[in-house]
Image (spheres, rainbow, N blue to C red):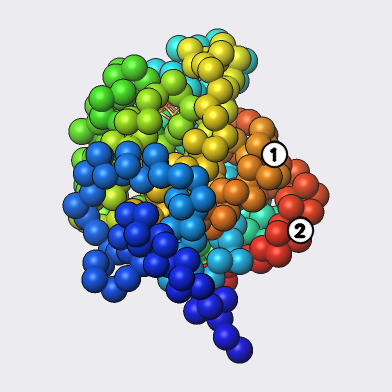
Amino acid sequence: MERVSDSVDTTAQDKAASAGLASTGTARPDIRHDWSAAEVEGLLGLPFNDLLFHAQIVHRRHFDPNRVQMSTLLSIKTGGCPEDCAYCPQSALYDTGVEAGKLMDVDAVVAQAKRAQAEGATRYCMGAAWRSPKDRELDAVCAMVEGVKALGMETCATLGMLDGPQAIRLADAGLDYYNHNLDTSEAYYGEIITTRTYRDRLDTLARVRDAGIKVCCGGIVGMGESRNDRAEMIATLACLPVHPESVPINMLVQVRDTPLHGTPELDPLEFVRTVAVARITMPRSVVRLSAGREQMSDEMQALAFLAGANSVFVGPALLTTANPARGRDAVLFAGLGLEPMEI
Ligand code: SAM
Ligand code: DTB
Ligand code: SF4
């Protein structure tokens, strides 16, 4: 049977090429690490249909367009975080009503992972509200990684900054992915976080990569940043020596009593454009339609999948905020003909 990806109309491809979309031919490789922010901003500003068409071509070259990777998140240590990330309900500096909890027991985490697996998740992501883990805390997280991995799931953790030996310990425990986001552009970063630097983030990412763990790294849009900031962030990600295997694009979830609550909403189509540009610039990466789905219409999510998103969090909760109920997702995925990506 002819694959859908082979049947793209070549006339349309020619039109896209003449609209300045480079990668429809074979002359230029589509895996590049030399993206300029100006070039990325140019992509963001394309006519919407041209941009989505281009993203679909790249997407279909590397992925089955009807398969979506499904992860489930668990907050293994909630609240009381010393950092000042202006979007985050878990910072101890903002009185958001999120109570500071203790690190969960290993057995409870593995039991919850098993439930998530039974409900279709193939990757389990464990998040902790830490600036960075203490070595004693890392012992427990390593045991969680081992337990979740023994179920046959992929493992992911997001624990804040890591030093080199900590990254190696997690790798030895069998951690598949480490999530550590750039969050925004280097220029806008100081408006959002003051308690650690952009360089700190890049250093942790390099340590994770050096330890042989796959990198999950993206950002948040809708924080009042400019289009140029979004372009800078995507260009920084796409110019890493190896593209992150997983690129979460989060829409800011506005939480009352965080400094960013009340930020003017980002145009949903600009969110979709950001997803498309992540897809085009990091063709082999899985791009996650990450936080914010609960607040999005089904139509907006459908456009994000069309733009090349091929991963989501499933299950009713993110870390401290809501994610779509399973029933709503079941209807959406069935309606769009989307199926789980095999691991
Ligand atoms: N404390 C660790 C850290 O910051 O690296 C790990 C957990 S932290 C909650 C993981 C990521 O969640 C942040 O980097 C941010 O990108 C995302 N995040 C947190 N609050 C968010 C919100 N309100 N809306 C969207 N994304 C959010
Ligand atoms: C990521 O990029 N998004 C996730 C995950 N990595 C850890 C977190 C979203 C958190 C949304 C706010 C909350 O639920 O607390
Ligand atoms: Fe802490 Fe992470 Fe929230 Fe920042 S994003 S306040 S580091 S939990």
Which picture quadrant has residue 95? top right
Q: Is residue 257 left or right of residue 199?
A: right
Residue 270 drawn above or below residue 341: above
Residue 110 drawn above or below residue 188: below
Residue topped by disc 2: 335
Task: Give amino acid for label 1.
Answer: Ser
Residue 132 drawn above or below residue 194: below
Residue 199 appearing in the image = yes
Callouts 1 and 2 close, C-beta under 8 Å? no
Outermost residue, bottom side? 1
Q: Residue at x 61, y 30 (%)?
A: 320
Tell me the quarter of the image containing the N terminus. bottom right
Q: How many residues crowd mark 2 within 10 Å: few (<14), some (14–19), many (20+)?
A: few
Residue 187 drawn above or below residue 67: above
Q: Is residue 63 left or right of residue 181?
A: right
Residue 114 appearing in the image = no
Instruction: Label 1: state its secondary structure.
Output: loop
Q: Residue at x 28, y 50 (%)?
A: 238
Q: Is mark 1 within 8 Å of ligand 1?
A: no
Q: Position of residue 61 (x, y in %)?
A: 43, 71
Mark number displayed over residue 297: 1
Q: How many residues crowd mark 1 within 10 Å: few (<14), some (14–19), many (20+)?
A: few
Which picture quadrant has residue 44? top left
Which picture quadrant has residue 203? top left
| Residue nearest the viewer, comparing 219 with 179 | 219
| Between discs 1 and 2, the one toward the N terminus | 1
Q: Position of residue 77 (x, y in %)?
A: 52, 34
Task: Give amino acid for label 2.
Answer: Gly
Q: What is the spatial separation of the Cα atoms under label 1 and label 2, in whole angstroms?
A: 14 Å
| Residue nearest the viewer, comparing 163 with 228 | 228
Q: Position of residue 260 (x, y in %)?
A: 49, 16
Q: Residue at x 43, y 67 (%)?
A: 13
